[in-house]
């Protein structure tokens, strides 16, 4: 049986409004929490006490780095484990909220207690049953590479070695996002989710890496190019977010393609630009390498015929 902790009966209007705004705003361009992951860290030697929240009991036992997190428990006993928002050491996160869910076999994994490590929580009615989700927000922006989000108490009730895990997943209705402290919040997708494995299941620890390239819309309706955020800004482009791609084209510009001009040359441009030059547009996404334009035919003639034409 899952022991349910009651949410505080008095919640500030500001915190409640922030939670609702966080859940309602859709994802936009990359914010400061881009490329972050959610991981699980277990504390094998920590005894569970029936006082204080699980979050309070595990706060002092977090990993120093993402790579030091423990994602496997190998004995049938009562354990405490925590959820952390993880960012690369080179990132500068500004975390004010997160939405996520959980998935597990409730006949093999038994939860005894749970608590949020933020200032306010907005769970679904079935939380934390498999497939349910929650939103956690903070009144003070979190800037650490590792932020304590949630804590659980439970055990594995199955045969040793069975492939059993407790998985972090997107929220069933809101998806998985990190929100920053802007108003309205920028929502960055959680790029990967950790798993806690029991017995022979090693679990999964997705530690974030450094910056990830994404789609860059070059100025003056230039083509879409995949590059790093910094590189895109240096050339005056608009960066569409880490991990975004150019197919389909996210740039708000007419599509580019190869244009075959009357002299046989090839040039890149929009269909309208090509038509204005009397060219033949080869279609969206086509390029001039390899050259798609047919060669200009060479007309054979005699010197006398040429003199007669231009006399």
Image: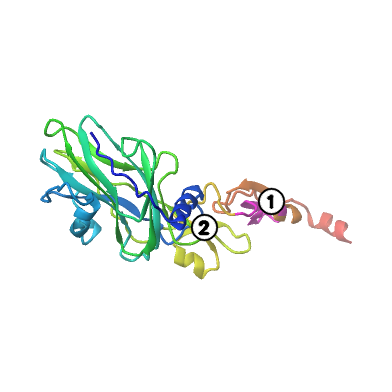
Q: In this figure, which colouring scheme has been used for the structure?
A: rainbow
* Label 1 crowd (10 A; few <14 / some 14-19 / many >=20): many
User: Which of the 4 image quadrants contains residue 106?
Assistant: top left
Could you tell me which quadrant the C terminus lies in? Answer: bottom right
Q: Secondary structure at mark 2?
A: loop
Residue span colored magenta: 252-272
Q: Is residue 182 visible?
A: yes
Horizontally, residue 130 falls left or right of residue 64, namely: right
From mark 1 to mark 2, how far is it between C-alphas? 37 Å
- Classify residue 251 as left or right of residue 94: right
Mark 1 in CB contact with mark 2 (< 8 angstroms): no
Locate residue 96, reporting x and y percent. Answer: 40, 58
- The residue indicated by pointer 2 is 184
**Mark 1 vs mark 2: which is more N-terminal?**
2
Q: Residue at 47% of width from left, 48% of height from top? A: 23
Q: Position of residue 91 (x, y in %)?
A: 36, 64
Residue 120 in percent (x, y) is at 37, 53
Q: Viewer-proximal residue, 253 or 175?
A: 175
The residue under label 1 is 271
Label 1 sits on a secondary structure element that is helix
Marking on residue 205: none
**Does residue 84 belong to the magenta stretch?**
no
Farthest residue to the bottom: give it.
Answer: 234
4 over 25 or under it: above or below: above
Q: Residue at x 17, y 39 (%)?
A: 155
Residue 297, can we see it?
A: no
Q: Residue at the location (41% across, 38% down)?
A: 172
- Is 124 drawn above or below residue 235 in the view shown? above
């Amino acid at each position: 049986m899952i022991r349910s902790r009651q949410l505080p009966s008095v919640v500030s209007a500001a915190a409640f409004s922030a939670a609702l705004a966080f859940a309602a705003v859709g994802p936009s361009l990359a914010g400061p929490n881009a490329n972050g992951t959610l991981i699980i860290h277990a504390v094998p030697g920590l005894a569970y006490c029936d006082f204080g929240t699980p979050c309070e009991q595990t706060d002092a036992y977090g990993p120093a780095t993402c790579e030091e997190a423990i994602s496997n428990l190998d004995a049938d006993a009562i354990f405490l484990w925590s959820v952390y928002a993880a960012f690369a050491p080179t990132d500068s996160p500004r975390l004010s909220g997160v939405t996520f869910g959980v998935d597990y076999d409730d006949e093999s994994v038994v939860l005894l207690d749970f608590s949020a490590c933020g200032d306010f929580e907005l769970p679904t009615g079935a939380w934390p049953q498999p497939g349910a989700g929650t939103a956690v927000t903070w009144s003070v922006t979190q800037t650490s590479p590792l932020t304590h989000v949630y804590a659980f108490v439970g055990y594995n009730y199955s045969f040793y070695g069975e492939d059993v895990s407790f998985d972090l997943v997107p929220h069933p209705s809101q998806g998985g996002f990190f929100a920053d402290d802007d108003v309205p919040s920028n929502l960055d997708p959680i790029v990967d989710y950790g798993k806690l494995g029991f017995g022979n299941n090693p679990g999964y620890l997705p530690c974030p890496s450094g910056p990830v390239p994404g789609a860059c819309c070059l100025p003056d309706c230039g083509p879409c190019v995949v590059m790093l955020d910094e590189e895109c800004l240096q050339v005056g482009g608009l960066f569409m977010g880490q991990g975004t791609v150019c197919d389909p084209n996210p740039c708000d510009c007419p599509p580019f393609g190869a244009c075959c001009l009357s002299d046989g040359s090839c040039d890149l441009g929009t269909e309208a630009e090509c038509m204005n030059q009397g060219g033949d547009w080869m279609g969206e996404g086509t390029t001039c390498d390899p050259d798609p334009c047919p060669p200009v035919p060479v007309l054979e003639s005699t010197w006398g015929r040429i003199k007669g034409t231009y006399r």
